[in-house]
């Protein structure tokens, strides 16, 4: 999930012609930390994701739009089910909070 999110952030950033330094400045996040997010090495907080979305000029939920990764609704449902099936309680609680924030 972190790698997919990181690719999405990188895709949005590069499609806007922005460097990591520029986005980091707009989002008030260190560009090295941003690079770690883009590589899937960091697990950003919801607050940092909101800052990144703002810096990119998108809604928070747009960071999680991954149609190019999972092309069909049934594929998306299968992916979510498989991912959640292997998650521990802590991860499930994090997912629940993210869903609540995304669907506000």
Image (cartoon, grey):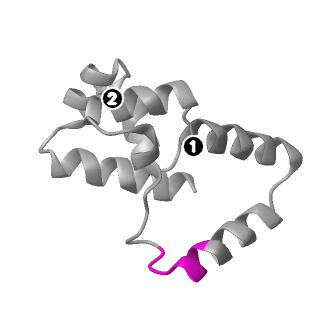
Q: Earlier in the sequence, mark 1 or mark 2?
A: 2
- The answer to whether residue 13 is above or below residue 47 is below
Camera-nearest residue between 67 and 48: 67
Q: Secondary structure at mark 1?
A: loop
- Would residue 39 be seen by someone viewing this image from the given angle? no
Q: Residues within 10 Å of mark 1 (few under 14, many from 20)?
A: few
Give the quarter of the figure containing the N terminus. Answer: bottom right
Q: Residues within 10 Å of mark 2 (few under 14, many from 20)?
A: some
Q: Count up the numbered dots.
A: 2
Residue 94, x across and y down, in percent = 72, 40
Quadrant in the picture for residue 81: bottom right
Q: Residue under circle 1?
A: 103
Residue range highlighted in magenta: 70-76
Looking at the image, residue 63 sits to the left or right of residue 43; the answer is: left
- The answer to whether residue 35 is above or below residue 79 is above
Residue appearing at x 45%, y 29% in the figure: 50
Q: Residue under circle 2?
A: 54
- Would residue 17 be seen by someone viewing this image from the given angle? yes
Looking at the image, residue 88 sits to the left or right of residue 81; the answer is: right
Residue 85, x across and y down, in percent = 82, 66
Q: CA distance from mark 1 to mark 2?
A: 17 Å
Residue 51, x across and y down, in percent = 40, 26
Residue 12, x across and y down, in percent = 27, 49
Residue appearing at x 56%, y 31% in the figure: 46
- The answer to whether residue 28 is above or below residue 71 is above
Camera-nearest residue between 50 and 41: 50
Q: Secondary structure at mark 2?
A: helix
Residue appearing at x 36%, y 47% in the figure: 9
Looking at the image, residue 95 sits to the left or right of residue 10; the answer is: right
């Amino acid at each position: 999930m972190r790698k997919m999110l990181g690719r999405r952030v990188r895709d949005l950033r590069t499609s806007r012609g922005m460097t990591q330094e520029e986005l980091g400045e707009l989002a008030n996040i260190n560009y090295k930390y941003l690079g770690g997010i883009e590589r899937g090495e960091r697990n950003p907080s919801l607050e940092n994701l909101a800052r990144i979305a703002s810096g990119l000029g998108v809604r928070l939920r747009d960071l999680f739009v991954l149609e190019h990764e999972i092309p069909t609704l049934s594929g998306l449902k299968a992916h979510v089910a498989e991912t959640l099936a292997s998650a521990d309680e802590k991860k499930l609680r994090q997912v629940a909070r993210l869903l609540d924030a995304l669907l506000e």
